[in-house]
Each structure stands twice: as structure tokens, then as C-alpha cells.
Amino acid sequence: MQLDIIAILCLSILNVFPWIYLLFQRPDEKIKNQLEESDAALAQLIQVIMHKMDSLEEIGENFGPQGNEINIGAILAQVLSQKMGLNGQNDYRRDERGQFNGPQEIIETEIQTLD
């Protein structure tokens, strides 16, 4: 009987100590302060980035054509026609078996030893 009472008393004391420690240390306040600091730093970083973006937009307006929109579809069509064109610039074509048809290139390498 006394052993049961001692075990319950020891377990209850061991359960109370962490709560008392947390009451005085307050890790939630430390986390809250760190989050506020990181939020403030993030807000300042976003302000700096937005300011830089505004200045880049002004620079782009000075160099780019005035009033013309960029036609991304035309740019993509031009790139695809260059890549898929039959003008011989694409050296990495494959045949029906999946082998490369381009010119053979021999690459010489030196053997390096790791110390």
C-alpha cells in the first residue's frame, strides 16, 4: 500500500515539474517574438523587392518599344521552328530505332585519380 502511494506521489511530482518549468521559461513567448522578427524582416524584404521591380519596370520602358506588347506565341513559334526545322542545324536528330544521326564527335578525357 505504501509503495503504491509513493509511486503515485513520485509520478505526480515528476508530472508537475515540467509544467512549473514551462510556466517560468515561456517558450511560446520566445517563439512569438522570433515569428514577429521574421515577419518584419520578410515585410522589409518584400518592400525592397517591390521597389527594385518598379525601378526595373522603368528601365524596361526606357529601352523597350513603346506601346507594343510582347507576343509570346510568336516567340515560341519561332523557337520551335528553329528547333524542328530541316535546315541541318539540329545535330541531335534520331532515326526510327532511336539512334542519333548527327555527326560523330570524339571527346577525349583524362583519367583523374582522387587522393
Image: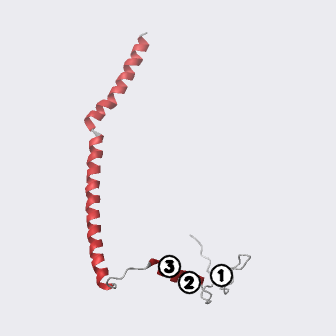
Disc 3 target residue = 76
| SS state under label 3 | helix
Q: Secondary structure at mark 1?
A: loop
Q: Which residue is mark 1?
A: 93
The amino acid on which the numbered mark 2 sits, given as a three-letter code, is: Ser
Q: Say above or below: 50 vs 41.
A: below
**Label located before the other in sequence (1 or 3):** 3
Question: In the image, residue 92 lies at what x, y percent?
Answer: 63, 81
Q: Quadrant of the N terminus?
A: top left
Q: Earlier in the sequence, mark 2 or mark 1?
A: 2
**Residue at image location 43% in from the left, 79% down from the top:** 71
Label 1: how many Cα within 10 Å (few below 14, some 14–19, many 20+): few
The residues bearing labels 1 and 3 have C-alpha atoms spaced at a distance of 20 Å
Provide the residue designation for mark 2: 81
Q: Which residue is at 29% across, 30% downward?
A: 20
Give amino acid for label 1.
Arg
Marks 1/3 in contact by CB < 8 Å: the verdict is: no
Q: Residue at x 30, y 35 (%)?
A: 22
User: Element type at marker 2?
Assistant: helix
Mark found first going from the N terminus, 2 or 3: 3
Marks 2 and 1: which is nearer the front?
2
